[in-house]
Image: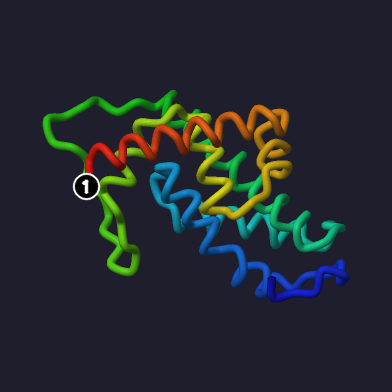
């Protein structure tokens, strides 16, 4: 982290520089409609409440990803209520020239259960420890460990089949 864990005050710019790429990656991996806009919304919330935050860098990271997770849940619920009529052509997906996408990995992630995918993204894209993922998802650490193990096993099997 770029900030001092002992400092309970954080500058928004430093928080954004440190966490925005991971938050955007979280939204992109979880299929948010507009990952960059969702990330921006998260940091608007962070900016509004940063002066009330108390804790170290790990607590700050957990807090930011809790906001991101809640925003994603709201987006997915809203999308489920506003289902669009399916057409013959799939929707256009914005290309991100600066982001390398491994199609096999994306397909393998899509094959996981929602819970497995959420755990893996929070663990390895957001780089959060198991206890923080458990807190964000409202699960026990043992359940998160099991979801992670099963998700990794499934990814390993799917990726080795395609190799």
Q: How many numbered markers are drawn?
A: 1
Task: Look at the numbered disc 1 and give the secondary structure of its residue.
Answer: loop
Quarter of the image containing the C terminus?
A: top left
Residue shown at the point (44%, 34%) measured from the top left: 153
Colour theme: rainbow
Q: Out of 104 and 99, give the one closest to the viewer.
A: 104
Residue identified by numbered label 1: 92
Quarter of the image containing the N terminus?
A: bottom right
Residue 97's x, y, as percent?
28, 67
Q: Out of 102 and 67, give the one closest to the viewer.
A: 102
* Residue at the left extreme, as displayed: 88
Q: Is residue 103 left or right of residue 61?
A: left
Residue shown at the point (39%, 38%) measured from the top left: 155
Residue 102 drawn above or below residue 47: above
Residue 13's x, y, as percent?
66, 74
Q: Is residue 31 left or right of residue 23?
A: left
Q: Which quadrant holds residue 139?
A: top right
Residue shown at the point (72%, 29%) measured from the top left: 140
Residue 42's x, y, as percent?
60, 54
Residue 82 drawn above or below residue 162: above
Q: Out of 82 and 68, give the one closest to the viewer.
A: 68
Residue 29's x, y, as percent?
42, 47
Q: Is residue 95 left or right of residue 27?
A: left
> Crowdedness of circle 1 by 10 Å Cα count: few (<14), some, many (20+)?
few
């Amino acid at each position: 982290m770029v900030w001092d864990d002992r400092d309970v005050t954080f500058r928004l710019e430093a928080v954004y520089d440190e966490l925005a790429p991971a938050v955007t990656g979280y939204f992109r991996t979880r299929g948010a409609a507009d990952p960059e806009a969702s990330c921006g919304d998260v940091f608007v919330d962070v900016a509004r409440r940063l002066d009330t935050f108390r804790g170290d860098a790990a607590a700050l990271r957990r807090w930011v990803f809790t906001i991101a997770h809640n925003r994603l849940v709201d987006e997915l619920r809203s999308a489920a209520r506003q289902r669009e009529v399916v057409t013959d052509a799939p929707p256009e997906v914005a290309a991100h020239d600066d982001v390398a996408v491994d199609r096999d990995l994306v397909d393998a992630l899509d094959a996981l259960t929602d819970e497995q995918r959420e755990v893996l993204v929070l663990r390895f894209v957001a780089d959060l420890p198991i206890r923080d993922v458990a807190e964000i998802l409202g699960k026990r650490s043992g359940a998160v460990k099991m979801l992670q193990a099963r998700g990794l096993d499934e990814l390993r099997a799917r990726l080795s089949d395609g190799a």
